[in-house]
């Protein structure tokens, strides 16, 4: 595991000699998302979608607004969760075909559960940290692969959720 921590920086340093990608002013993405929700020892799985908009201030730094929605059925109860977050994103655009990125975002999470028309819901603080890569398929389009850790706090317990997504990125303008 300790060796794996050094793998990403080694790859990034090795590839700095590659030609850089053009930096888009804006990136808009839509993805299928999967959430492994943790409720203090019991886990369940939800499917959903994620949409994001990123404004790139320069070739390596920008701000990302992201909205996600998930739903599913757990033990006969319909469960849904939505997140709205914003924060900085750091991209590495020196690779020819891929742009790895990392981000940290803060915002809110809304979760609800309903059974026989009776529902309970709550809104709490959420923090997301993670990263991924945009794989270029055309000048203004890419495939995004992303994995994140989502921290929330419901019922007096901290939840350590994992989310993954795959989708399409459209790029607009140039920096």
Image: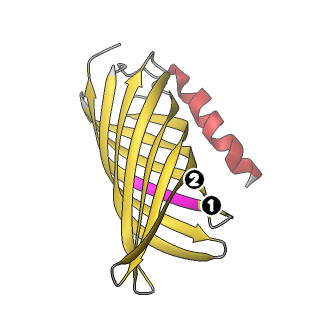
Q: Which residue is mark 2?
A: 149
What predominant SS class does the magenta segment belong to? strand
Quick check: 94 above or below 6? above
Residue 172: x and y, percent? Answer: 25, 24
The total number of labels drawn is: 2
Q: Foreground residue, 75 or 91?
A: 75
Quick check: 108 above or below 102? below
Residue 164: x and y, percent? Answer: 45, 56
Quick check: 73 above or below 28? below
Q: Which of marks 2 and 1 precedes in the sequence?
A: 2
Q: Residue at x 73, y 49 (%)?
A: 3
Query: Do residues under tags 1 and 2 come within 8 Å of each other at their CB atoms?
Result: yes
Q: Quadrant of the N terminus?
A: bottom right
Which residues lie in the magenta part?
161-165
Q: Foreground residue, 28 or 42?
A: 42
Q: Is residue 163 magenta?
A: yes
Q: Residue at x 37, y 56 (%)?
A: 69
Q: Is residue 98 magenta?
A: no
Q: Which residue is mark 1?
A: 160
């Amino acid at each position: 595991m300790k060796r794996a921590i050094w793998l990403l920086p080694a790859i990034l340093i090795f590839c700095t000699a590659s030609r850089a990608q053009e930096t888009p002013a804006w990136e808009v993405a839509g993805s299928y998302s999967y959430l492994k929700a943790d409720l203090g020892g019991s886990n369940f799985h939800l499917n959903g979608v994620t949409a994001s908009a990123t404004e790139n201030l320069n070739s390596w730094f920008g701000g990302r607004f992201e909205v996600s929605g998930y739903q599913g059925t757990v033990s006969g109860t319909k469960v849904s969760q939505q997140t709205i977050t914003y924060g900085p994103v750091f991209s590495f655009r020196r690779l020819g075909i891929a742009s790895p990125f990392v981000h940290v975002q803060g915002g809110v999470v809304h979760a609800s559960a309903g059974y026989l028309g009776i529902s309970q819901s709550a809104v709490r603080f959420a923090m997301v940290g993670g990263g991924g890569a945009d794989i270029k398929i055309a000048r203004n389009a890419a495939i995004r692969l992303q994995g994140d850790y989502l921290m929330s706090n419901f019922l007096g317990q901290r939840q350590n959720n994992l989310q993954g997504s795959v989708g399409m990125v459209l790029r607009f303008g140039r920096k």
